[in-house]
Amino acid sequence: MSEVLDADAKVNLSRASVLLVESTQHAVDLLAQIVKGFGVRDIFRCISIEEAEKVLSSKSLDLIVMEPNLREGDGYAFISNLRRSKVEPNCNVPAIIASGPAFSSAVAQTRDCGANFYISKPLTPHVLLERLLWIGREKRQFVDCPTYVGPDRRFKFEGPPPGCEGRRATDAKDPIGQPAAPNLSQDEISSMIKPQRVAL
Amino acid sequence: MTDVRFFRPENRLAKLLARPGGMTVATVLERAIEGIETLRAGTMTAIDLKIEEMVRECASSQPNRFDVIRQLAAELFGDAGAFGLGELSLAAKSLHDLVDTPGAKPSARVIMVHLDAMRALRRPAVSGTPASRQAVLKALTQLSRQIAAQAATATEHSDALQALDQGITDLRAIADKARGATAGDDENEYPLPSASGSGA
């Protein structure tokens, strides 16, 4: 997912409202300095779930950046509850989980709580901006089902894994077989769609 | 099949990013790094306090002391890494993994050797040589893996324990030597990567 940022591209986040939730005051201040550098003016800093919920109930947000392992509360549960709250517009706000050393379990929990993206710490402005711009471009639809609410967890779909029937009604039940006939040549395709002058 | 609803919520972040004006990517990254730098002294103090808090927890008999140490090590991992103290960050990760291993009961001695090493690595510009710092890190990681392996098999191997004893003795010697060289030097000098760096 890493990409090269275009140094000359413009970023305009002056009207964005961003909620930052971290485990300590200096950690949230550090994150705020990065986001402030990006041009964001409306920054809400919280170090507990209780504080974050107060902000959610009173402000319309454009982005959440969250450390899930707080001293007071569980950030994954916070995002999951937010998605299920159905309280517009914040329930669909893009959410980035920024977490520390527990990599594999943290990524899985991030995916399953309904967050948009996972960033492993230590945080750098470059990586955070990269992910933020990626979220701004992403076209994933949201999924709402009894066990999950959030961005579609299928970044790409090439059929259910071998031996599985799939979980969605749209999942193909039968394996895709071999082609029934050879592929058409480019000339054959052109002759089917290209208007031709015919001499009579 | 699960009853699933798909929808596309409005991505307000995308609309904000698409607005004209703003600053270039190079400018916002530069601003973010400058912002982080303003917090360097405070964060270094916070790092020192966290190391000493872990030392106190290690010596205590509180049943939740491993949880406290795990939380502080995770925080220190992010704090140190954000300010370019990569070796300290890795030592914090080693300690975090050590106390996070299910079933592992690391002794106070093993935790303390991590903390001694972290005290030394906190001032990398004046602590030993890059090779000696790498040796400390390598020994810490090996130590954590050995203990995790012992927890997984629920057995105690006397030869492995003997090797651990020697490893801890070696680490103490390196860390003590490095710590002895720190007095009076500029301990906070450790530059961040430039705005063009690729980050984590």
Image (cartoon, coloured by chain):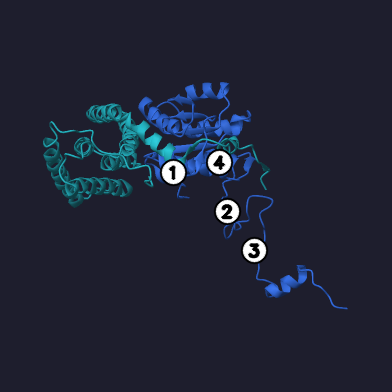
Quarter of the C terminus of chain A within the rendering: bottom right
- Chain identifier for the cyan-coloured part of the image: B
Q: What kind of element bears circle 3?
A: loop
- Which residue is identified by label 4? A136
Q: Position of residue B15 (x, y in %)?
A: 60, 37
Chain bearing tag 1 is A
Q: Earlier in the sequence, mark 4 or mark 2?
A: 4
Q: State the CA–CA distance, disc 1 to disc 4.
A: 26 Å
Q: Alpha-carbon neighbours of circle 1 within 10 Å: few (<14), some, or many (≥20)? A: few
Residue A198 appears anywhere in the view = yes
Q: Nearer the viewer, mark 3 or mark 2?
A: 2
Chain bearing tag 3 is A
- Which residue is identified by label 3? A175
- Which residue is identified by label 1? A105
Q: Earlier in the sequence, mark 3 or mark 2?
A: 2
User: Which residue is at a point 46% across and 33% down the rendered structure image?
Assistant: A66
Badges 3 and 1, same chain: yes
Q: Alpha-carbon neighbours of circle 4 within 10 Å: few (<14), some, or many (≥20)? A: some
User: Which residue is at a point 63% across and 44% down the rendered structure image?
Assistant: A141
- Which residue is identified by label 2? A156
Say left or right for A122 vs A133: left
Q: State the CA–CA distance, disc 3 to disc 1.
A: 31 Å
Kindly identify the amino acid type of the residue bearing the numbered disc 1. Answer: Ser
Residue found at the very far right of the displayed protein: A200
Q: Is residue A162 above or below residue B139?
A: below
